[in-house]
Amino acid sequence: MDVRVVLHFAIVTRALSLLLQALLNAAIPDHEADAFRPPRVEEPLYLDSAVEWCFGGLSHWDAEHYLFIAERGYLYEHNFAFFPLLPVILRGLAETLLWPLSGWLSVRGRLLLAVAVGNSALFLLSAVALYAMSRVVLQDRRLALLSSLLYCLTPANVFMTSGYSESLFAALTFGGLFLLEKGFTFRACLALGIATAARSNGLVNIGFLLYLPSLNALSQIRAYRTTTTGRGKALRYAWVVARLLVTSLLGTGLIALPFCAFQYYGYRTFCTPSTALERVPPALVSLARRKGYRMPDENGPPPLWCMRPLPLLYTHIQDVYWDVGFLRYFELKQIPNFLLALPMASLGIMAAYAYYQANPDMCLRLGLWESARRRLDKPTPGFFNPKVFVYVVHSTALLIFGTLCMHVQVLTRFLASSTPVPFWISAHLLLLNEPLLHRRKTSVPNVQLRAHGATRSGGANPLHNPVSALLPHWRNCSATTQCILGYFLSYWVLGLALHCNFLPWT
């Protein structure tokens, strides 16, 4: 039942997102931003203008890179900042599912339609995967449901809807972590490895592969210590350690392989090129010369980064084209961007602080073993469950790295698509502080959340969607609820209004 509620809410929010971006894109004139806008070298067909009107807002800012790669391949050096899985999926949809429309839509039009269809479907998968993972980790149905419903109102909504890889990465990451929690290690490594082909920060998921099997191995060793003796104990210990080492090595290689293969492809493209500029449409060559974009040319010298001991194209692009580096973004003029990222950063900080306050001893032991007294107690379900420890560490590491080494305004979508912790802590705070979500009577007369139906005996069913039920009672909600839902909803709408019109957003 809960999965159906999450799926229904995800469908509603996707439909609203697509409708609002079309209306806002039509109502607000596009800002003349200094963004990547390659010329159209293909003649438009009959339905291209209609698709552009309906979904043109999904193609702005970095989405233009993904669409260009899907249409033309990796033609410019800075295109290699965007990993290939999403362009491959978009091109696959354009050439298969949407192929019957090829007589009415150009490749560009079909790719834009593929963004709307593909990312909507991927978001539904990510919402269901988040709920499944949350049930396993939190061991609390209400918290898992509320977290997943809040995810459907994610502050990174516009990036989950438009031609970005966030929905794809979230679906693969949450699904892979669910499989890892259930013990399906090989399938989990496949999912997390594919996620690395979507975004570079998929490499960080290696930490889960190293930690969760290690935790399981320690549990087995503790069990063997009390149930086996002599030589049998030593053999069992050796088997557990050997299996852990093999799993860690193979799994790490599987997750890192897409990143390494993509960097090798970039090296071969620019350091040993086999393409002449004469084969490229003149309009695209002219754009490269006008903007200073490097293109692979078999008749030209290789770039200087090819001569480095470790010639990583991704590192070169982040350094030269985006000026990404340690503390480089700490400038007075970037204060507005820090303020935009502050709500998401605050959720991450609160999650880490609250979890440490509730489990100081376990945090100091890195969650690998518990005190004798703690082992006798039944684990508490909810956000302070011991299983949550590694996710809080992962979220905190991403938060620190994103704040110190990245353009801080991307922190909202960076965390929202990579970790469930912001949604877990938000749901935890709502359940803790919102009387309307409790079964007991509230202090506000005649205000109770109603279920959407009744049982055969006439009683009320359990509350189906607590988020949609809270919104009509906004004025009677607690300050915590108003802050959290206000943040989620305002960013949900503002992102569509600004990003879809080439205005700066997170």
Image (tube, rainbow, N blue to C red):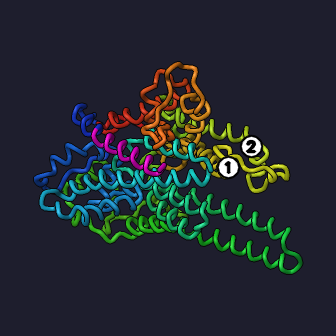
Q: Position of residue 351 (x, y in %)?
A: 63, 39
Crowding around mark 1 (Cα neighbors within 10 Å: few <14, some 14 to 19, many 20+) is many
Magenta stretch: helix, strand or loop mostly? helix
Q: Which residues are magenta?
A: 1-19
Judge left or right: residue 493 versus residue 356: left
Question: What residue type is disc 2 on?
Answer: Asn
In the rendered image, the vertical position of residue 464 relative to residue 343, given as above or below: below
Q: Would you say 231 lies left or right of 76 here? A: right
Which of the 4 image quarters holds residue 89? Answer: bottom left
| Residue at left offset 80%, top offset 53% | 375
Write down the quadrant of residue 218 in the picture: bottom right
Relative image position of residue 241 (x, y in whole percent): 74, 72
419 on left or right of 361: left
Q: Secondary structure at mark 2?
A: loop
Q: Considering the image in quadrants, where does the C terminus appear?
A: top left
Label of residue 359 in the image: 2
> Can you say whether 360 is above or below 177 in the image?
above
Question: Image point 20% across, 60% down: which residue?
Answer: 281
Viewer-proximal residue among 165 and 277? 165
Going by the numbered disc 1, the residue's amino acid type is Phe
Callouts 2 and 1 close, C-beta under 8 Å: yes
> Is residue 334 a member of the stretch shown in magenta?
no
Q: Residues within 10 Å of mark 2 (few under 14, many from 20)?
A: some
Residue drawn at x 66%, y 60% is: 212
Of the pair 191 and 149, the residue shown nearer to us: 149
User: Total marks drawn?
Assistant: 2
Instruction: Give the residue at mark 1.
Output: 389
Q: Nearer the viewer, residue 125 or 448?
A: 448
- Where is residue 91? Give x, y as percent: 29, 62
Q: Quadrant of residue 16?
A: top left
Report the residue at 54% width, 35% height from top.
Answer: 330
Question: Residue lying farthest front?
Answer: 457
